Image: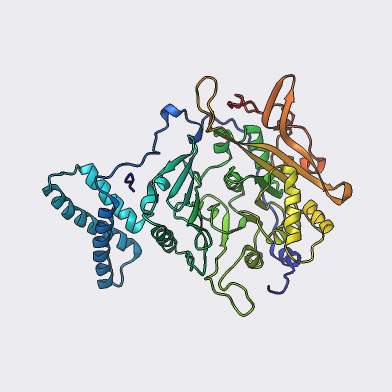
Amino acid sequence: MTDTRPETPATDFTALFAQALNANPTQGAPVLRPVPAQVSPATLPQSIVPDTSAPAALPVGHEVLAELRSRASMKIGEAAGADASMTEQDRRQHGQSIIRQVVSEWATKYAASGSDLTPQQERAVREAVFDELFRAGRLQPLLDDPYVENIIIYGDKVRVDYADRPTRTWDPIAKSDRDLINLINHLARMQGQGERALTPATPNLNLRLADGSRLAASAYVTPRPSIVIRRHRTRGQGLDDLVRWGTIDASLAHFLRAVVRGRKNVIVVGSQGVGKTSLLRAMAREIPSSERVGTLESEYELHLHEDPEGPEVVAYEGRESNGERGADGKLQGELTLSDLFPQLLRMSLRRVIVGEVRSKEVVPMLHAMNEGEGGSMATLHARSPQLSIERLATLCLEAGIGMTEALAYRLIAQAVDFVVYVRLVDESELVGPDGKSGRKHRFVSHVMEITGIGEGGRPSYQMVYAPREQDGHREPRAVPHGNISQTCLEDLVRAGLDRNVLQNRWGSWGAPLETVVPL
């Protein structure tokens, strides 16, 4: 093994939302401006991307690190016990000093055995011990790597998905399954997210890590512990950044700004890991800072409440149960998104943003979009923009409130203005004829307008942006198709849209999409 461093009464959501959202919109006209060409970290040529996939070797095994951790932990505990006023920050700072002392004493004895450590090696040992005590242990190098997208763990099998290179295997994160569960519970304690823990009573755990990554873990109901960590490599990006990274072009960025400022309701859809949250976050940053917005998430991923230049945000996060059940059979302590929605709507909000719609929260969300001023947004898993309508309808029917198919379709048609579809093309395992490795491509391919009730009572729609193929030229990314309802167009023009943008048949993508296999 290579060493590494570190059921309550039904709520009248319609009436509630009508009372909560009652302010007049204020909006400024956006400016269409050119954005300099640039690439995202995922698009850097292989030759200039630092290869951080191999863990840095330590001069000793993890058995020694475990002993050093035990010594330092004992001293840190004694110091904390002697000073009851010590904060967590004080504990960390004092812990660094103790770790330095413990490692220095050990290094002196280690050198007496004839094996001197370099300053870099001794520092690596100190950092590894600190990671074991205060951070994520052997997981930390992966969490520190800006190119890591997903960390997938099944017992001692570890797979890492990168943005800039093919998937690779990694050394085990823990010595045993028990140690792995202990590590995950250590992370849960450090995050301070209520009573979340991985135990026989609560065999499933979902939490947010300090860097914004989302961790999902299962044990006791699986043969071995299974963990997936999905990382958000970017958190402060705006629409211009997405232009530079090739997710959207300048004309689409201008259109989306007008959509947000024109208070249109938007659902961002796509498959898992495609970048829906990143796009939603970038669009939300276009909301005027004078507005009051509510966000609702299972785990904080949007982090809009941490943006000093953004709007005023009331951020709600769901809570998992403590594993116990009450007399009614419900899990004690659990707060789902649908549980939190009524309170959120009492917060005098202008918009509501749902991080991801997965369950019966879909009904109050659609009511929020339908009855408010507009401008609410959410993400949704769907394999195409058209299938997003069916997905929303299915969730409505599964909500268990007596919803009919006809009513679900009507609610969707009245609530949603636009569906933005994000596509992922993963060619990181492919090699082109020129010998160059492929990479991952994330881009918006469709913007679909919901135009009302159509044939058979289903929502009608038209593509405002979509791929285009003409005269042997194909553009798989979203380009204008000139389809948009007159009323909606007028609203967007008032919000600053230059209608000429919608006349550019090939958009403003510039260079063609460089794929190994033509799309």
Relative to 425, is 11 above or below?
below
Percent position of residue 282, x then y: 58, 44
The residue closer to the viewer here, 414 or 187, is: 187
Residue at (23, 59) in percent of width and height: 98
In the image: residue 27, left or right of residue 43:
right
Percent position of residue 240, x then y: 57, 37
Residue 50: image quadrant is top left
Residue 252 visible in the displayed image: yes
Query: Which corner quadrant holds the N terminus?
Result: top left
In the image: residue 343, left or right of residue 415:
left
Residue at (54, 23) in percent of width and height: 432
In the image: residue 167, left or right of residue 34:
left
Query: Which corner quadrant holds the C terminus?
Result: top right
Percent position of residue 399, x then y: 72, 63
- Most extreme residue toward the front is 223
The residue closer to the viewer here, 215 or 168, is: 168
Residue at (30, 73) in percent of width and height: 84
